[in-house]
Image: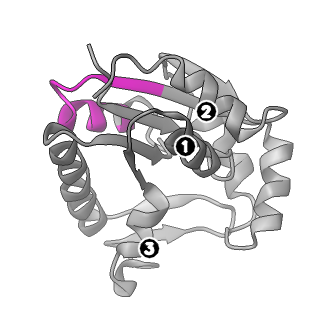
Amino acid sequence: MTTQVIVLNGGSSSGKSGIVRCLQQVLPDPWLAFGVDSFVDALPARLRGSDGGITFAADGGVSVGAEFRALDAAWTEGIAAMARAGAGIIVDDVFLGGPASRQRWEKVLAGLTVLWVGVRCDSAVVAGREIARGDRVGGMAASQARVVHEGMSYDVEVDTTHTESLECARVIAAHVTGCR
């Protein structure tokens, strides 16, 4: 079966966005990319830092409320609809809820052929990347580096600790089946 959706799961600063850009270059067909960071950026400002929206704790923890969840459900359904309409989709997400986060995607992507990808990176390396980015709460990347993979299984895993995004993208692309 032809792969219709590629879902990358990894903690903050693990290198998912770079891999996505490389995948878009190495895959033979055009693929649309959607990341959780873009979703959060698209939220109304009033939902950032509010109980109903999304909050980032001083220790890097993330909490989401009911309004966030409702908009997230619409976002994921929209992405699935694009895949069903024939677009190749790459999703860059952070499964803070572990298997429950994956199950949320499995539900909306039911009937589609999905390649599940784990993006790992050493916590010390992501902590350095987080500092270099300057747009994250300190400690978020290190706290997510391990927790997002707990209880997870993947079709393919890559580790960006010592491997560049392009090489990781080539490994993932080798697992993409068929042509759209």
Q: Which residue is pictured at 75% across the width and 67% down the height?
A: 133
The quadrant in which residue 59 appears is bottom right
* 43 versus 163 height, above or below: below
Q: Residues within 10 Å of mark 1 (few under 14, many from 20)?
A: some
Q: Earlier in the sequence, mark 3 or mark 1?
A: 1
- Crowding at dot 2, Cα within 10 Å, few <14 / some 14-19 / many 20+, comes out as many
Q: Which residues are magenta?
A: 101-116
Specify whether 90 is left or right of 168. left
Are the residues flagged by discs 3 and 1 in contact, CB closer than 8 Å?
Answer: no
Which of 170/130 is in front? 170
Q: Amino acid at mark 1?
A: Gln
Give percent across and percent down for residue 144.
64, 45
Looking at marks 1 and 2 on the same chain, the residue that comes earlier in the sequence is marked by 1
Report which residue position mark 1 lands on. Answer: 25
Q: Nearer the viewer, residue 169 or 14?
A: 169
Q: Which element type, helix, strand or loop, lies under badge 1? A: helix
Q: Which mark is residue 41?
A: 3
Q: Is residue 156 magenta?
A: no
Q: Determine which residue is flagged by label 2.
A: 169
Q: Are marks 1 and 2 in contact (CB under 8 Å)?
A: yes
Which residue appears at 17% of the width and 27% of the height?
110
Q: Is residue 10 left or right of residue 168?
A: left
